Structure formats: structure tokens, C-alpha cells
Amino acid sequence: MKDSLRSISFNKFKSSPISYLSVGIMCGLFLIIATVLAFIEPLILIVAVPLIALPFLFASHVACYYLQINQQINPSAFLRYFVGFFRSQFRGSFRGLISFLKSLGFYFAMFLIGGFVLYLIFKANYGATFTDSFNRLVYLYMSNQESALEDIIATLNDNDGLLLTFIVYISVIAIPLAMLAFVYYISFSSISIYYRTNVLVASAPLLKMSVNSTYSLHHKSMRKDWFLLNWPILALSLLGMALFVMLDLFFVRRIDLLPAFVIVGGVALLMFYLPFYFANMETIYKKYEPYFKEGNQRAIENILLRIQNSIELSEEEKKHLEESLRGASKDDKEE
């Protein structure tokens, strides 16, 4: 089954390589451009990722899918897909907020662990010079003095930026695992995009229940298939981070920009695999498409049961309600 799934995906790519290559490389370049904003201010990414990067990634998924059914994609169509990301039908396609919060947990965990280890290393190498500056930084950070910000900046830059280097190194340790987790979470969640695209008429709550039901029952095998086909995404992301760290350390030599280099490096090499990645995601969805449809039926039956248990309905009203709910998935069942 493993080999067949991989071969199915590769054959899908071979059926339309130019389409996959063009969309994949364009998507990769756009992700690089979006993450370059980290050089201006890393916090900008909190706005840029959900409002720009994820909608573009979503549009790339949909574009590749429609190219497979010989539907021509032009700039206006791609723009429609981009805007379509914000429709209620596609809300939760990447589980962006949940994915971000989970990744943030990894970041803080690694920040604390890395900070503790680096503190011991810096203390052993720089002694009182480091510990005195560190204690002063903690005191200034906890105080409410008006001049605290200026004093914090001055303390960070004392001793040739010793504390600044310490904090930057902690960030560099914490970012990779958090970024890999975020890439995985949004990618795994995006399997549902293809199901959402196939359901022409459906309420957002019904879609959410259908998708959640499918993931909860089949997440183990879906995760196994995802890693089988898409592990190079994580490997390239990690390699890109390592290369960009070396680029900064040996050529640019701007320690304050090192975290931004790590973030950009995390997506810099993805364009080389994204064309295969989109074919992989379609292949995974096709395998689980019947389960998504079953999830839809379970969701409908759940809603019907809740309504019938909460209010008195005649047989005719129950029949009409059931037909209305099932009508929302009629197009899905006919495919």
C-alpha cells in the first residue's frame, strides 16, 4: 500500500508536470516573499501569515486541483480562490489559530530548555560579566521605571552585545521545532480543502462536524500517509534553516537578524518540493474521500437526532427537515 500510494501520487504529478511545477514554484516564491517581512519586524508575520500567506497557499491547493480537471487558471481565477479562503465554507481549512498556538507551545518549551542550557554555557565562559548583566536585565524588565526601555537596550548592547547574542541564540534554538510543527499542522489540516471544494452547498457547522468526525476516526492512518509522502517538506525546511544560519554567521554577520534568517530559511527550499507536495495532498484526499462523505452522513444524523430530541416534530416535519439537511450534501454524494 505504501508503494502504491507513492506511485499514485507520482503518476498524478507526471500527468500534468508543467501545471504542478508552475503553481508549486510560484507558491514557494510567494512564501519566501511573505516571510522576508520578518527582516522588518518578526511580529508582522502574525498578521501576514493568516491574511496573506495562508490564503495564497489555499489558492495554490485549489488551483492545482482544478488544473487536474482541465479547468484553465488565470490571474483572475487565482484571485477568486485567494478571496474564497475567507468564505465560511473554507473557514478552518488550515486550523490556523490552533496550529499557531500548538507551535507556540513548542517555541516556549524550547525557549526555556535552550535558555537554561545556554545560561549555563555563557555563565561558564563569561562568568560575572554575563551573570551581572543578566541579573540587571531581569531587574530592569521587572521594574516599571520610565527609563527602563532605554536601560534594557543599553544592557543588551553592553560587553559587545553579550546579552543580545544570548537571547538571539535562544530564539534560534526555539524557532526550528516551532516552525516545523506549524508547517506540519497546517499541512495536515489542509487535506480537508479538497472535500470542502467538492461540497457545493453546505453550512459551515455541518462541514466542521464532518471534517472533525473524519479526522478523529482516521487521524492515525492519515498522519502515517502524510509522513510517508511529505517528509521531504520537513527535511527541506530544516536544511534551509541551517543554510541560512550559516549564511548570516559567515557572510552577513548580523547577529540581530539571525532569527529572521532562520524563518526565511524555513521556507526557502520548499519550492523544490511543493509541486510534488500538491500532488501528494490530492492523493491522500482521494484515499480518504469516502470517509469524509461518511463523516458528512454522521454529522447529518447527529444534527437530526439532537433536533428531534429537543423539540416536538410531526413525521412530516421530520421528513422535511431530513430532506433539507441531506440536500446540503446532495452534490457531494452524486460525485
Image (cartoon, rainbow, N blue to C red):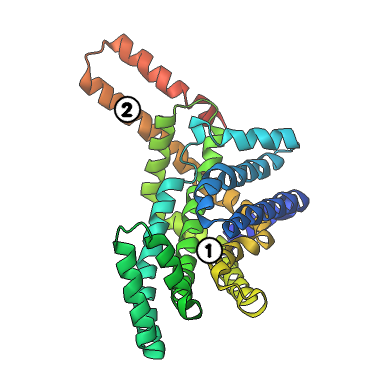
Q: Which residue is mark 1?
A: 228
User: Can residue 71 be seen?
Assistant: no
User: Can residue 302 be seen?
Assistant: yes
Q: Residue at x 47, y 81 (%)?
A: 159
Q: In the rendered image of this protein, does residue 252 appear above or below residue 223?
A: below
> Residue 152: percent from the left, percent from the top?
41, 66
Marks 1/2: CA distance? 35 Å
The one nearer the camera, 293 or 85, is 85
Q: Residue at x 75, y 51 (%)?
A: 22
Using the rendered view, name the quadrant where residue 108 is placed.
bottom left
Q: Which residue is mark 2?
A: 303
109 sits left or right of 191 in the view:
left
Q: Indicate which disc, 1 or 2, sits on the residue closer to the N terminus.
A: 1
> Residue 143: percent from the left, percent from the top?
29, 61
Q: Which circle marks residue 125 in the picture? A: none
> Residue 171: percent from the left, percent from the top?
46, 68
- Secondary structure of the residue carrying tag 2 is helix
Q: In the rendered image of this protein, does residue 169 appear above or below residue 227?
A: below
The one nearer the camera, 247 or 146, is 146
> Residue 321: percent from the left, percent from the top?
36, 16
Q: Residue at x 56, y 37 (%)?
A: 85
Q: Report the amino acid beneath label 2.
A: Ile
Q: Report the amino acid beneath label 1.
A: Leu
